[in-house]
């Protein structure tokens, strides 16, 4: 998995500004209509800077998603949850964590960029959890897709239910 941990805060900040500029523009226009010049202007960087980091708008969004996943990994004890990703406490933690990036995920969803999100979560699940053998690849894909779809539905419904209720629903699905 190409997860980037930036030691250089300026580099990380620049990458984040570029991704956030894309998200802002995506709220006003279709992704395919966004031009790199508009992104660089909004982000306050040059085209050269953009191309130093990314080869496309899509790769900038993908990188930002990897940064989010890297932050998630930094906050969890991967070894302690390897056999417990289906536990209600972990599901609740995941919902609350990714809710911090609700605008990013909702914008991707509204632009029909589900494959970007699904590819990232599937890759994360396989690389982190497939090797311990507690869940098969099929179970991991089922869980990651279900979690992503449930999270997006919850966000798109303006979180009308508390996250604890959503976590309980997902937990019960896998434990009944």
Image (cartoon, helix red, strand yellow):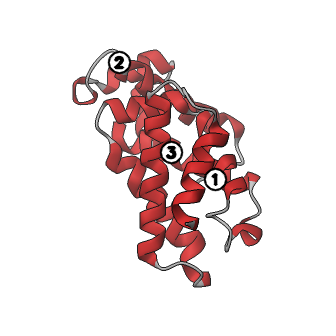
Q: Secondary structure at mark 1?
A: helix
Please tell me whether residue 76 is drawn above or below residue 82 in the rendered image: above
The secondary structure type at the circle numbered 3 is helix
**x and y percent of residue 8 in the render?**
70, 43
Asked whether disc 1 touches disc 2, contact meaning CB atoms under 8 Å apart, the reply is no
On the picture, is 70 further left or further right than 40? right
Mark 2–mark 3 distance (CA, rounded to whole Å): 21 Å
> Which quarter of the image is occupied by the C terminus?
bottom right
From mark 1 to mark 2, how far is it between C-alphas?
38 Å
Towards the viewer: 50 or 106: 106
Q: Are marks 2 and 3 in contact (CB under 8 Å)?
A: no
The mark found on residue 91 in the picture is: 1
Kindly identify the residue that appears in the image at 60 percent across and 35 percent down. Answer: 99
Q: Which residue is mark 3?
A: 65
Residue at (77%, 69%) from the top-left corner? 80
Q: Earlier in the sequence, mark 3 or mark 1?
A: 3
Which one is nearer the viewer's eye here, 130 or 8?
130
Q: Position of residue 50 (x, y in %)?
A: 44, 34
Which mark, by number, is residue 38? 2
Say how many tags the image has. 3
- Whether residue 82 is situated above or below residue 17 in the rendered picture: below
CA separation, marks 3 and 1? 19 Å
Q: Nearer the viewer, residue 26 or 58?
A: 26
Name the residue furthest bottom: 133
Q: Secondary structure at mark 2?
A: helix
Label ID, residue 59? none
In primary-sequence order, the first of circles 2 and 3 is: 2
Sequence-wise, which precedes: disc 1 or disc 2?
A: 2
């Amino acid at each position: 998995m190409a997860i980037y941990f930036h030691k250089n805060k300026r580099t990380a900040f620049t990458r984040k500004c570029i991704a956030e500029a894309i998200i802002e523009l995506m709220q006003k226009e279709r992704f395919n209509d966004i031009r790199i010049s508009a992104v660089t202007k909004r982000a306050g960087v040059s085209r050269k800077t953009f191309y130093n980091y990314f080869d496309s708008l899509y790769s900038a969004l993908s990188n930002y998603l990897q940064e989010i996943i890297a932050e998630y990994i930094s906050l969890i004890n991967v070894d302690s949850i390897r056999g417990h990703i289906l536990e209600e406490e972990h599901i609740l933690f995941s919902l609350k964590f990714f809710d911090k990036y609700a605008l990013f995920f909702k914008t991707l969803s509204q632009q029909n960029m589900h494959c970007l999100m699904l590819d990232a979560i599937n890759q994360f699940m396989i690389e982190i959890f497939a090797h311990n053998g507690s869940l098969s690849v099929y179970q991991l894909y089922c869980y990651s897709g279900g979690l992503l779809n449930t999270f997006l539905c919850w966000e798109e419904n303006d979180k009308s239910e508390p996250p604890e209720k959503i976590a309980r629903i997902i937990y019960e699905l896998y434990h009944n």
